[in-house]
Image (cartoon, rainbow, N blue to C red):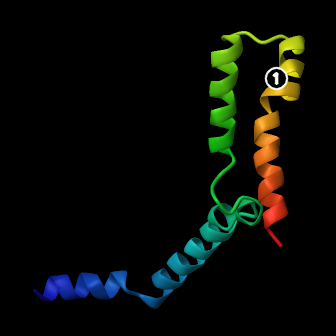
Amino acid sequence: MRIFGYELKKILNWKILLVLVLFTALFYFMFLNSDLMKYYPNGHPAAEDYEIGKMLVTKYGTTLDKAELQDFIRTGCQKTRQEMDSRIAKSK
């Protein structure tokens, strides 16, 4: 039992704990504290990209030329634009 206590004393050394706290803070500020949360409070924009990709594949297939893309921008995104305009109009 004393061996366990000695090992805990080594692990819970203040120097090692300081290094762990600094590493955790650095990791948080580099990867988890993102500015995207200000612009996308309801989730990551990858979900919207996936939905748009599904719409493109079902409407145009696996290949897409420039004319089809322009057609999708004019017609297919109109519903999304209307939804976003209504959300923006409702917010302060």
State the image coordinates of residue 60 (x, y, percent, origin top left). 71, 12
Q: In the picture shown, does residue 44 fall above or below 67?
A: below
22 or 77, nearer to the observer = 77
Q: Residue furthest left?
A: 1
Mark 1: give few (<14), some (14-19) or many (20+) Cα within 10 Å: some
Residue 68 relative to residue 32: left or right: right
State the image coordinates of residue 52 (x, y, percent, origin top left). 69, 32
4 or 35, nearer to the observer = 35
Image quarter in which the N terminus is found: bottom left
46 or 55, nearer to the observer = 55
Q: Which residue is mark 1?
A: 72
Q: Quadrant of residue 51?
A: top right
Q: Quadrant of residue 86?
A: bottom right
Q: Quadrant of residue 9?
A: bottom left
Residue 56 relative to residue 1: left or right: right
Task: Say which residue appears at 83% left-offset and 26% top-offset.
Answer: 75
State the image coordinates of residue 17 (x, y, percent, origin top left). 47, 83
71 or 40, nearer to the observer = 71
The residue type indicated by label 1 comes to Phe
Image quarter in which the C terminus is found: bottom right
- Count up the numbered dots: 1
State the image coordinates of residue 49 (x, y, percent, origin top left). 69, 37
Q: Secondary structure at mark 1?
A: helix
Q: In the picture shown, does residue 75 fall above or below 80?
A: above
Task: Say which residue appears at 72% left-offset and 58% top-offset.
Answer: 40
Task: Say which residue appears at 64% left-offset and 59% top-offset.
Answer: 42
Residue 65 relative to residue 44: left or right: right
Task: Say which residue appears at 67% left-offset and 68% top-offset.
Answer: 33
Residue 41 relative to residue 24: left or right: right
